[in-house]
Amino acid sequence: MTETLSINGLKLSEPLALIQVHAPHATVGLLSPFCRLLAQHQVNIAFITTSAAVDSQPVVCCIEAKDQSVVEALTEQHERLRGYVHFCGRVGVVTFYPHHANLKFMGLALQVFSRNGIKVHALASSISALSFVVDFDRLEEAGRLLVESFQLPENASPLRTDFKVRQERPPV
């Protein structure tokens, strides 16, 4: 008999733009100037993950799709970021919680996505949630597959965020 893993919830994002920031053989990381640039222009980061590498610090992040053209222009004008920021398409984030620090959750989710041809562009784990970045046109399917693969509480369904927190410019 196969054990069904229980989760408490599943959340699907709105459309996002996937960004990769990477400078091979960089002497100074690009994470700080990239995040500072987005903050200065009140662009929210919906998802971010990075790793420490010997000679660079690759970053994968998602911003609201509507902000992509602004960020493209800003990074092309930025001396340190120009040429190192790549926009990789429209994606969404599917997040489920909690995973109880059990790696079976990640493994099962990755198997489900792989069997169904859903590309995972990035993933992140926190103390309570696992998040997967997938193509936006497959986001609903990814959510449905996870609902079918995990045990959700009765009457639970994937959540869509219906509110947003935006940075506001201070009065001048």
Image: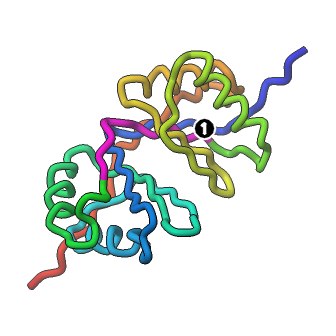
Q: Nearer the viewer, residue 169 or 26?
A: 26
Query: If the image is split into quadrants, where does the C terminus sit?
Result: bottom left
Locate residue 147, reporting x and y percent.
Answer: 61, 24
Q: Main secondary structure of the magenta part?
A: strand
- Are there few (<14), some (14-19), or many (20+) residues within 10 Å of tag 1? some
Farthest residue, direction front:
25
Q: Nearer the viewer, residue 47 or 71?
A: 71
**Side (left or right) of 6 relative to 27:** right
Q: Residue at x 68, y 57 (%)?
A: 127
For disc 1, the marked residue is: 9
Count the labels in the image. 1
Q: Residue at x 39, y 62 (%)?
A: 23
Q: Which residues are magenta?
A: 86-96
Residue 42 painted magenta: no
Locate residue 108, reporting x and y percent.
Answer: 71, 29
Mark 1 belongs to which amino acid? Answer: Gly
**Side (left or right) of 16 relative to 48:** left
Q: Residue at x 78, y 36 (%)?
A: 104
